[in-house]
Amino acid sequence: MSIFVDKNTRLLVQGITGKEGQFHARQCVAYGTNVVAGVTPGKGGEKIDDIPVFNTVGEAVDKTGANCSIIFVPPQYATDAIVEAADSGIEIIVAITEGIPILDMMKVKNYMGNIRSRLVGPNCPGIITPGLCKVGIMPGFIHKPGGPIGVVSRSGTLTYEVVNQLTLQGIGQTTCIGIGGDPIIGTNFIDCLDAFERDPDTKGVVMVGEIGGSTEEEAAEFISKNMKKKVVGFIAGLTAPPGRRMGHAGAIVSGGKGTAQEKIAVMKENGVHICEDLCTLGEFCAEIFKQ
Amino acid sequence: MRIHEYQAKELFRRYNIHIPYGGIAFDPDEARSIARRIDRFPVIIKAQIHAGGRGKGGGVKLAESTDEVYSLTHGLIGTKIITSQTGPGGKLVRKVLIEEKLEIEKELYLGIIADRKTSKILIIASEAGGIDIEDEAVAVPEKIIRVYIDPNIGLQPFHCRKIAFDLKLTSSVWKQFVLMLQNLYRLFTDYDCSLVEINPLVVTAKQSMTALDAKIEIDDNALFRHRSIIEYRDIEEEDPLEVEASRFNLHYIKMDGNVGNMVNGAGLAMATMDIIKLAGATPANFLDVGGGTTIEMVEKGFRLILRDKDVKLVFINIFGGILRCDVLARGIVQAAGKTDLNIPVVIRMDGTNIEEGRRILYGSGFKPIYAADLKDAAQKISELAGTRKGLKR
């Protein structure tokens, strides 16, 4: 078992004829993902390898039964792409695009509140259920299929580091999900933690947060109230200066709020097993998840 | 992107939001001629720097005559002002805003922000103007008025009326307030602001709703659709190395330690800074070379770190994903060949194309210290920090 993506995922790639879209569509196929369609307006009828390209998401869904979409379009067109996917009934929408204006994302987020589709991202590496399905840009080979640990993170390469350490300890993953580094994102920590709690094959979760916002604190409260499974937490940015945007649009300590110290304190209070030294995270997880 | 008070007030004027009469001066002569035009004393002189807390830091002065305007401006321009927000180094004043002093009946606080927690546009108001709103929110939370706006429907007149009545505005000004708030909201959305703040917003003795101060921050991600606003960017307010990095699409932030570091990905870059600290040293910077990085960008990034004179040790930490290890290695070798490298460089590399990356590094004349993994890297940094002068915390 897994969350959000599995062997039944039929993936559509929005922006498939662009450089990134094409490259990662092939990488997803190479990993074993069932990529059924691509969409680039004006390029309907073309093919990328064996993948048919359509003009609209609606047409692609009708003809191929796509139920999941990954978005590689530039930031100025990304909200359009997300809403098109949502309006076409796509169940899981993964937006990789970095740099979408915050007011655009706010509108999308408020619109999506009334819609069944799940948005993951933007500004995220995507989702992978190791061995079964990769809907993202992460290097597949560092993952270990079969579980029993779920990983949820606001970051990209930091997640790879964490996953790699788990794999080196012989700890497999059920699903790894990057929720994105932007201030406004679709799926949040709580959505993922809730899904992992319900997934029978996931025995524990590693949660990787960073400075900015308060989603880690909210997640910590959720964990203490609603989760029986163990959660290991890591927060990046203990040394980040206040008031500065640390690469991710969402990673900023503003008005003294959203510091790593504050998050770690709240997570500890709520029973999250905090690992403060990234160098030893793998060993730490092996110890915590031993039983 | 932050803009100056005088620039924010220019935008206010365009949106029919009242501001005090005045102008921007780059030297004492200009300041004096603006004061002559105002022709009513005292006038206010406000240092234009990208930091708040100017009043307490000595960046706001009152002048009783044109001569005093001249001498006070002379004293301000070219000096550094230290406020709670500038850091210990302070900020150099290059220009001052000269304004008429108004007779004030009531001071209010008004702010609009993009609220990440609720995904709504949040209007914050308070009857206590001129205060630090964050302190106020903690001390007397019940005095803070908050109204959340769904960005898809936008600000409605009733939102404005509610705030006006909660602020206990009198019949002579509440209609003015409603109009002003609508204009301000329009400015906020038109220019993709992440913050607009008027502190204080005042009711003058003549019953005019006027913005005494103005603070605007624009969402960097939206600058592509606001070419005119990019001209407001004041590069002199920024760190020169940061400005140069931004030209190459690198996220670089100068810090006060001495272990330079280069990492791919923001999260891993922050975590790497934390590792440096845990190892007993301090990070000299944040540098995310990103995913879609070229050999040239890696080279530029590496050379940028080396130009920081405080840097005594470099730690390169790469987990290859989209950025392949061979690309990274080529960039490093290229940069090393062009610079006179006399400080140790610790490299930890893993992920996509690691073998090819290693082959390139090993085959070059460049001899860094290789770390097998993060733990090994931390160990090596710790050892170097212990032995090299000036590296230890």
Image: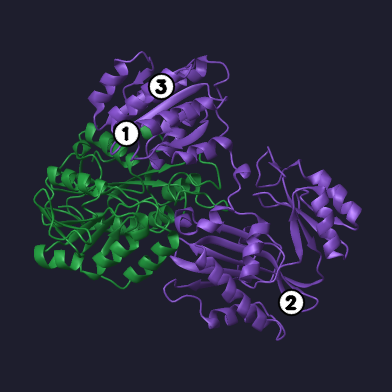
- Give the quadrant of residue B392: top right
The disc placed on residue A84 is: none
For the residues marked 1 and 2, what is the alpha-carbon distance in whole angstroms?
59 Å
| Label 1 secondary element | strand
Within 10 Å of disc 2 (Cα), the crowding (few <14, some 14-19, many 20+) is some
Give the left or right position of residue B50, taking residue A68 as reference.
Answer: right
Q: Is residue A163 above or below residue B178?
A: above
Q: Is residue B367 above or below residue B26?
A: above
Q: Amino acid at mark 2?
A: Ser
Q: Residue at x 54, y 21 (%)?
A: B391
**Between discs 3 and 1, the one toward the N terminus:** 1
Asked if residue A225 can be seen in this view, the reply is no
Q: In this figure, which residue is indicated by the disc labeled 3?
A: B346
Q: Residue at x 21, y 57 (%)?
A: A4
Q: In this figure, which residue is indicated by the disc labeled 1?
A: B319
Asked if residue B19 can be seen in this view, the reply is yes
Within 10 Å of disc 1 (Cα), the crowding (few <14, some 14-19, many 20+) is many
Give the left or right position of residue B245, taking residue A146 as reference.
Answer: right
**Chain letter belonging to callout 2:** B
Q: Which chain is green?
A: A
- Give the quadrant of residue A147: top left
